[in-house]
Amino acid sequence: MAEHLGDRLARLRRMADLTQEALAERSDVSVDVVRKLEQKRKHSARLPTLHALARGLGVELTALLGDPPGVPSTGEADSPQFVAVRRAIMPPLFAPPEEPNGVERLTVPLLRREISDGWTLYHNAEFGRVMEVLPGIIADARFAASVGGADEKAAGQAALGKALQLAGHLAIRLGRTDLGLAALERAMAAAERSSDPLLVPMVSNSVAWNYQRQNRLDDAAHVAVHAADLAEREHGKTAEGLRVWGGLIMSAATSSARSGDYDAANELMTTAEHATRRLAVLRPPEDGKMFSVFSRSSVRIERVRLAVQHARPDEALALAKGMRIGADIPASWRTWLLLDVARAHTDVGDIEGAVKTLERLRRIAPAWMRHHTLAVAIVTDLWAGPHRPPGLRTLAEFLGVVNQAR
């Protein structure tokens, strides 16, 4: 079973040579919250609280969150599959570029289809499959970016930028934020040499997410706002440009919310939601998977998340009620919504509603749920309560909160 949040907090606090009172003061968090977490009387905390504690401890947010919802770390050496991804992101120094596996794979349209399929695997949380296919895609894209005329190289650079952006997302999801940033730096360099004018702001959005994971919230907000201004000024009249702009505005809102400014975040989200109406009258992108996720559904999902994180469960449930999720929303976003709704039900004392939502989440994404620390925390909180409705034991056993009944 994964290390409990309270155990991680106590271990990091001792490493920083801080008392509970000193950590509370440095983090501007109640000492009662610190005590309850470390004594395991409280199994989870709001993201703004976790960001504050991470700042007080001088660590990345991921140090407190534990394993992200991906392939769990074991403390052992990287697997051969992940080593291959690392090598694809950062090829051996001073070595000649590798030849592609097959000349037929070098057409940019085929490369873009393979990259699009890789993003689908990523959003379906099939991270093992992404690790298998990504090194070959990056190698082929890197070769395509180095041959042919100027236009062909520029198209190859666009493919390389998207492949390295996917590598950055994978690394971040697996808790390797420094490797993720290295991949995104290379993606940005390719984007600046590419034929895709929207690739720079799209990669900027990924950089902002990486900074959020590292608790660099001011840096994340600055990057997102700057890139959003660029996208709106130069491409705001196209569906592609509007989607990229919207994704960046949502990212800026998330940074504001995690910094504790919920009103500013809500204002940004409301602005974004109003802007989604313009998508209905614009020609949709040929391949939406290659652009930022932005629609009325995605904005509403993010608004639910922010409301939950800021102890506004009634508002979150009202936002989620009757929501129609568009077909363009990736599976990973749908699973996040269910987890947030389960948390909101828990916070208002609707234990049956929380269990039903978690049961649905388990049916849709069992592997994702098993590795998600928030899912474990919610079920742990429910199991510790006085009322255990039907289905809760099955969930607790599935997540390892309790041993399976004999």
Image (tube, rainbow, N blue to C red):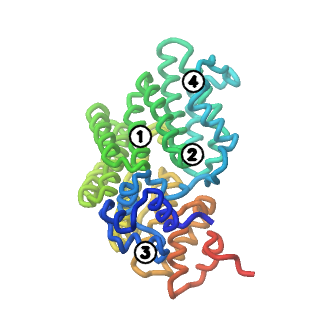
Quadrant of image for the N terminus: bottom right
At label 4, counting other C-alpha atoms closer than 10 Å, the crowd grade (few under 14, some 14-19, many 20 or more) is: many
The mark nearer the N terminus, 2 or 4, is: 2
Nearer to us of marks 3 and 2 is: 3
Amino acid type shown at disc 1 = Val
Q: Give the percent coordinates (x, y) of residue 389.
A: 56, 84
At label 1, counting other C-alpha atoms closer than 10 Å, the crowd grade (few under 14, some 14-19, many 20 or more) is: many
Label tally: 4
Kindly identify which residue carries mark 1: 207
Helix, strand or loop at disc 1? helix
In front: 28, or 383?
28
Instruction: Estimate the spatial distance between the alpha carbons at disc 3 and disc 4, rounded to whole Å.
Output: 51 Å
For the point 67% across and 20% down, the residue is 99
| Outermost right residue | 406
User: Any mark on residue 120, and which?
Assistant: 2
Kindly identify which residue carries mark 3: 36
For the point 52% across and 87% down, the residue is 387
Nearer to us of marks 1 and 4 is: 1
The mark nearer the N terminus, 1 or 3, is: 3
Instruction: Estimate the spatial distance between the alpha carbons at disc 2 and disc 4, rounded to whole Å.
Output: 21 Å
For the point 49% across and 23% down, the residue is 155
Nearer to us of marks 2 and 4 is: 4
- Is 297 on the left or on the right of 237, as rendered? right
Amino acid type shown at disc 2 = Thr
User: Any mark on residue 106, and which?
Assistant: none
- Is 115 on the left or on the right of 35, as rendered? right
Nearer to us of marks 1 and 3 is: 3
